[in-house]
Amino acid sequence: MTSSRSINSLGFKTNTDYHINKLMVIVDEEHLDMLDELMLKDKWGVHVIYIVTDSPVVRAMFHDNSRIYPLTANIRSLLRFDTIDEIVCCTSSLSDEYLFELAEICNQFGVSLLLQPDQNNPKVPISGCMFVAEYFFYVLETNPRRRTGYVLKSIIEMTFAYLALFLLSPFFLLIAALIKLTSPGPVFFKQQRVGLRGRRFYMYKFRTMVADAEKQKEALARYNEADGPAFKIANDPRITGFGRILRKTGFDEIPQLYNVMKGEMSLIGPRPMQPEEVLAQDEWHLKRLCVKPGLTCVWQIQPERNKVPFDTWMQLDREYVENWSLVNDFRIFLGTIKTVLVAKGL
């Protein structure tokens, strides 16, 4: 699976249809009816981003609809630098070797693999089945998003976010007034982050730094204490006096309830990183992107978390995804409350 493609400077693209499932469809001439149906974005709520085929007929018919690549395309590169939720195999003619490698790639990135029922391939461990459009597929599921518990989690979290934003609104006003009184600049800080499968969104926080903090970042790069692409300084000179209190208590993160309400984040999940940080990560780190990012995560409740090596942090996130459960989420939630109560900060 080797070929090349051009990418933009940060790799990921901004998605206007944030909540629509993005597909890569591997197809042959015998299954053109399936591809035709999957192209009905408004009808089925899916968007075919890539078509992978060696068929000149498919290329001729759909060259204006999606980006088309041959079967030898570098699937890893496409998944790393674009937003793909599922790979749908609308063909029954793929070799066992190709499918086995495809399954390995999907597992690495946390992307679902959908196979035709007549695809005879005992090497791919099927974990379920589902319909896409009007068609039945076997599924190799590599993330927890379709589990009943995870769907329930999302409903609970969005409801919680609505209620919390309403109940905490007087508290918001108090924090906003104190930010304005203690430091010139806006109340809120927003920054582009990378969420579910590479989708970009703006994450909101109460401002804890001076207004021109982002402009000062380059000058402070030599003081970065993180051993990976993240940027961390224990005693960051850009943090304001009241900002330190907000960070110690974790109250600066409260506006992210708005991101939860919009469905861009969860209460519990891997922390969202900036696009340039994600682009610099190793491939095995990226499975953390197969669930929505969270306000708090396993890393944030670690003792002296800022001393945790970057690869260990990424491994904690990967293990969180691979062993996800409601019980584990509840434990992280309780650990977060403890962290806030002892003012260790988030």
Image (tube, rainbow, N blue to C red):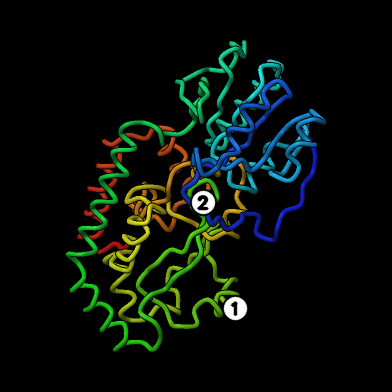
Q: Amino acid at mark 1?
A: Ala
- Between 203 and 286, the one lying in front of the other is 203
Find disc 1 in the rendering and name its residue. Answer: 219
SS of the residue at dot 1? Answer: helix
- Residue 199: x percent and y percent? 53, 52
Find disc 2 in the rendering and name its residue. Answer: 310
- Please tell me how crowded label 1 is: few (under 14), some (14-19), or many (20+) other residues with Cα within 10 Å: few
Give the mark nearer the N terminus: 2 vs 1: 1
SS of the residue at dot 2? Answer: helix
Q: Could you tell me which residue is drawn at 46 percent across and 34 percent down?
A: 143
Q: Could you tell me which residue is drawn at 46 percent across and 21 percent down?
A: 129
In the picture shown, does residue 81 fall above or below 213?
above
**Where does the N terminus fall, quadrant-wise?**
top right
In the picture shown, does residue 280 fall above or below 59?
below
Q: Is residue 28 left or right of residue 280?
A: right
Q: Is residue 72 left or right of residue 188?
A: right
Q: Could you tell me which residue is drawn at 26 percent across and 48 percent down?
A: 333
- The quadrant in which residue 156 appears is top left
Q: Amino acid at mark 2?
A: Phe
